[in-house]
Amino acid sequence: MVELRGWPSFPEELPVFTPETAAEDPRTLFVEWLTEAGEHVLAPHAVTLSTVDADGAPDARVVILKDVGPAGWAVATSSESPKGLQLRKDPRAALTFFWPGRGRQVRLRGPVSPAAAEVSAADFLARPPASRVEAFIGHQSQVLHDPADLDAAAAEAERWVSENPETAPETWTRYLVDPDEVEFWQASHDRRHVRLRYRKTGGSWVSERLWP
Ligand SMILES: Cc1cc2nc3c(=O)[nH]c(=O)nc-3n(C[C@H](O)[C@H](O)[C@H](O)COP(=O)(O)O)c2cc1C
């Protein structure tokens, strides 16, 4: 058995979250928390993206948040990857951020749509060369029978990317999660964790405290 008790989850000092003074728009509060997390944790923009597969079973993996704007929270991947195929069939998702260094979690869920082709292409072209090559290799999550196949595909992708520096693969897609619900969770050492959930109703947001 692994002894898991006693491992600390949070630092001794935690921020105090006061829902009464929180922004009216969850995006504003999210950007505040994300910016602050960037000063305390590695990869604050790493987020668990949850989707459902063709059988309705949940699936989840970590991706990188690419942007947050009026159209939603943006992530990027191949439309041919398992998550891309899942989103094509059932365009709904949840995003879960966890920033242990601040004792904070943010959860959001809602419909997902692909960004315009030129936005996805710009996302791809802004990636560093090695990341572009990685995306061009393709076959994400398929079984790799022989590592030599990956070496060959990488060499081919590298050649393609260097000869076509302005071209993005059609499969590279920015997905926008436009949440109906966003929940902010702030740990407290007295276990009175503070939770604030925003729900979109009509065109505006309603926020409610939740029991911990
Ligand atoms: C920190 C971190 C960041 C990642 N960022 C991305 C990303 O932005 N896009 C992506 O397609 N995969 C990313 N991955 C890999 C995914 O977690 C996953 O392994 C891959 O996308 C295949 O997922 P799928 O089979 O569900 O489609 C990242 C993994 C980690 C650990």
Image: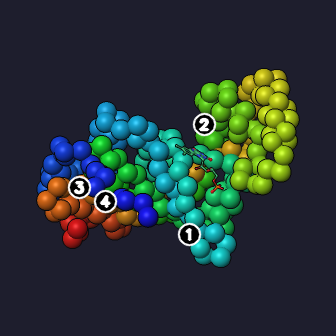
Q: Earlier in the sequence, mark 3 or mark 2?
A: 2
Image point (65%, 76%), residue name = 55
Which SS class for mark 1?
strand
Q: Earlier in the sequence, mark 4 or mark 3?
A: 4
Q: Crowding at label 2, few (<14), some or many (≥20) Cα neighbours within 10 Å?
A: some
Q: What residue did someone put label 1 on?
A: 58
Image quarter hosting the C terminus: bottom left
Q: Earlier in the sequence, mark 1 or mark 3?
A: 1
The number of numbered badges drawn on the structure is 4
Look at the picture and state if 204 lies above or below 22.
below
Asked if ligand 1 lies within 8 A of label 3, the reply is no
Structural distance between the alpha carbons of marks 3 and 2? 34 Å
**Which label lies toward us, 2 or 1?**
1
Amino acid at the residue labelled 1: Pro
Residue 139 seen in render: yes
Q: Crowding at label 4, few (<14), some or many (≥20) Cα neighbours within 10 Å?
A: few
Amino acid at the residue labelled 4: Arg
**Which label lies toward us, 3 or 2?**
3
Amino acid at the residue labelled 3: Ala
Identify the mark at residue 123; answer none if there is no mark: 2
Q: What residue did someone put label 3 on?
A: 187
Q: What residue did someone put label 4 on?
A: 5
Image point (46%, 57%), residue name = 95
